[in-house]
Image: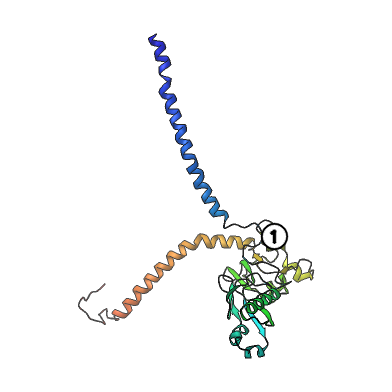
Amino acid sequence: MGSAARQTGNPEPARTQGLFRWLALAALAPLLIGCTTVEDQRIRQYLHEKGFGTRAEGVASAENYVMGGDQVQFIIDPNVYLQPGFEQLYILSAPQPVQIDGTIFVPYVGPVFVLGLKEQELASLVALQLEAIRSHPVQLQARIVSTGKGFYMFGEVDRSARFIPMTNGDLTLLDVMARAPVTDLANMGRIKVIKPDAQNPLAMVVNVREIVETGYTTFNLRIENQDIIYVPPTFFGHISRFLEKLLQPIAAVSQVAFGASFARSSIDYLLYDEADSLLFRGRGQRRF
């Protein structure tokens, strides 16, 4: 009986401890899941499902639209300024940069959100806003002075990476490569043009050297707003860049040491003459 009692009594503490462990895990599981969910939600709110990622997107070469960095200008009949209550509309005739929140200032109305609007849409919106305030129709035209649109260049180009504003809507890859200051290590036979997108980006490798030598312009791609152009190095360029990065810490240390040596020699030149005597005497005279 005693042995039977011991056999039936021993498993109870182990079972109780196991039950407590499971209950503790069950209690902590919502907290762990909640932390992960909150972090994932914060990350997801910064992600996007299509496009480049900017708030305003479109095909500017087909129909211009307002994006960050652009300036907006309105063309208004000067006789409108002579009407009572419309004197301040001259402000719209000057180019106005789009603010960081995507708005422009319209007299008598205040900030108006214009990000992503095309020229006709922009003119209609501002005219409606003014008509609602002054109860009188205003005829105006909108012009987008684009300074915020451009493309990116990385790789073997000056200043390593650049953003180049687009002042010409009819721009091709050959136009860019003919004007871009590339390094001597650039591989002109494998220029990569990337059409960025969150889901379906398109990357094309173009032999610019072949276009120049043969005139075969099938791959003389049109460069659009927010395109990415990557200029890779040649085979020996890869080796050169590898050695450059490998020796960069040594060069930095050598530069610091040379700077300290130069400063020391400058102090010696100022304080001592050829006879090794002090030129400037102070309280503490010393010699090396």
Q: Badge 1: how crowded within 10 Å, few (<14), some, or many (20+)?
A: few
Q: Residue at 54%, 50% (x, y): give it.
A: 40
The picture places residue 190, in percent across and down from the top left corner, at 69, 63
Q: Residue 122 lies in what quarter of the image? A: bottom right
Q: Is residue 222 visible?
A: yes
Above or below residue 256? Residue 21 is above
Q: Which residue is found at the position 50% from the left and 46% from the top?
A: 34
Among the 4 quarters of the image, the one containing residue 220: bottom right
Residue 167 in sight: no
Taking the image as shown, residue 8 lies to the left or right of residue 114, namely left
Q: How many marks?
A: 1
Residues 222 and 11: in front is: 11
Residue situated in front as seen by the camera: 79 or 198: 79
In this view, 68 is above or below 74:
above
Residue 114, image quadrant: bottom right
Q: Residue at x 46, y 38 (%)?
A: 27
In the rendered image, the residue lying farthest to the left is 283
Residue sitting farthest toward the top: 1
Residue type at the position of mark 1? Ala
Q: Is residue 232 left or right of residue 31?
A: right
- State the image coordinates of residue 48 (x, y, percent, origin top left): 62, 58
Percent x, y of residue 143 = 67, 79
The residue positioned 41% from the left and 70% from the top of the image is 258
Residue indicated by mark 1? 203
- Which scheme is used to colour this image of the protein? rainbow
- Residue 125, relative to residue 202: is it above or below? below
Q: Position of residue 103 (x, y in %)?
A: 58, 73
Q: Is residue 280 left or right of residue 173?
A: left
Q: Quadrant of the N terminus?
A: top left
Name the one closer to the observer, 157 or 90: 90
Q: Under tag 1, what secondary structure?
A: strand
